[in-house]
Image (cartoon, rainbow, N blue to C red):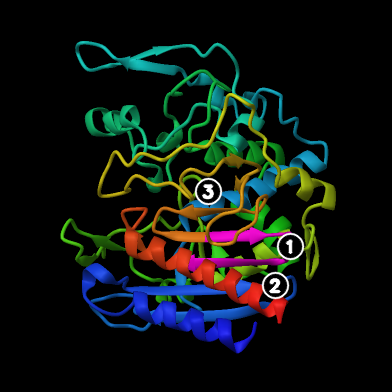
Amino acid sequence: MNSEITNAADKILQRVTSGEPAERVPGVVAMITDTATNTYEGAAGVRHMGSGEPMTTDTVFAIFSTTKAIGGTAVMQCVEEGLLDLDAPAKEYAPEIGELQVIEGFDDAGNPKLRPPKTDVTTRMLMLHTAGFGYDFFNENYARLARDHCQPSVVTGTKAAIRTPLLFDPGEKWEYGSNIDWAGRVVEGIRGKRLSEVLKERVFAPLGITDMAFTRTDDMKARTATTHARGADGGLAPMDTFALPDDPEVDMAGHGLYASIGEYMKFIRMWLNDGMGPHGRVLRPETVEAAVRNGLRKHQQVVMLPGVIPSLSNDAEFFPGLKKSWSYTFMVNEEEAPTGRPAGAIGWAGLANLFYWIDRKNGHGGFWATQILPFGDPVSFTGFLDFETAVYRHAKAAAAA
């Protein structure tokens, strides 16, 4: 990556970590990769606003829903090996999912009204977020279950956290939620192992990933950034007691990993290289091609995520007004984005304002990592969009030179 983009990216990172609290983030790590190596690595700000410990490129983050694509990779490996039929009932592999019912609101006493689903949940539905699961911070029925009926949050890492009712009959529509956590349970049922073991053997080893896990080592804990809460006045406060659990009851395929960002870039490069890693193949080229294409039906569409718990999420949407679809398991922008990201590129985000994209057409990808709640933080999200825009602007200028 030429010096112009390096200088532009450095300026963006310095800008978003400077100034008054309402105009800044505590710290950020951002990286760009091509098919071979990282072409930009930057860090600015601090891991913790109280201690002032500097943010570094080897800082460990709770990567939340950027975990999903990694869990989805383990699912697609099972498909490749003929061990998983995406259209078979998921209860054949994870029996507990067959016990869940559909919620149809609440009765006069405030208790949930439940009925059996009209169809079975399939793993394809789980991968596409059409199975009927949601999140309490994006769905009022789930928020009410949490508030009035002690339904545990998914961030507790417990079995009870994902034993939620379905919001609608499986396959009816798209709603973003805990689907991939259940897909991870499908993988565990097939492999007969914890997901952590499956990922270590089948994804991390061929990619040379060692600094990514559901349970942190002591060294990883020492390098972990603190999550900060942005208040209504725009100020930032460290959430010193908030963290994804180490040694969770369930290895959550949808949100549970910790990682340094350089390790995630190895995963992005695998998608840029048709499934190949430096130490072996992770996915076949034809599986990669299938996994990055829209899998939704015409009546299903990716929609804005409504923030129903303000402390956890704002209303959030990538590229409003542009058509977005979903694949296994990424958002696909079906039109060129204002940043320059082309139609057909893939990407997604994590709750604490982590964002990435993978552009297989042009052979590069990027990641922007902060640790702030609520999701859709205006400073972090705008910084990410500026970062991505700078990448495409300078790449276009370099190509024209």
Could you give the CA–CA distance between mark 3 and mark 1, rounded to whole angstroms? 26 Å
Could you give the CA–CA distance between mark 2 and mark 1, rounded to whole angstroms? 8 Å
Determine which residue is flagged by label 3. 251
Q: Position of residue 105 (x, y in %)?
A: 32, 17
**Pointer 2 or 3: first along the chain:** 2
Front-lying residue, 253 or 386: 386
Q: Report if the CB atoms under discs 2 and 1 are less than 8 Å apart.
A: yes
Please, what secondary structure does the residue beneath circle 3 have?
A: loop
* Circle 3 Cα neighbour tier, 10 Å, few/some/many (<14 / 14–19 / ≥20): many
Image quadrant in which you'd find residue 203? bottom right
**Pointer 3 or 1: first along the chain:** 3
Find residue 34 and name its label. 2
Could you give the CA–CA distance between mark 2 and mark 3, rounded to whole angstroms? 30 Å
Identified by mark 2, the residue type is Asp
Give me the residue at 59% from left, 33% from top: 126
Residue sitting at the far bottom: 3
* Circle 1 Cα neighbour tier, 10 Å, few/some/many (<14 / 14–19 / ≥20): many
75 left or right of 47 in image:
right
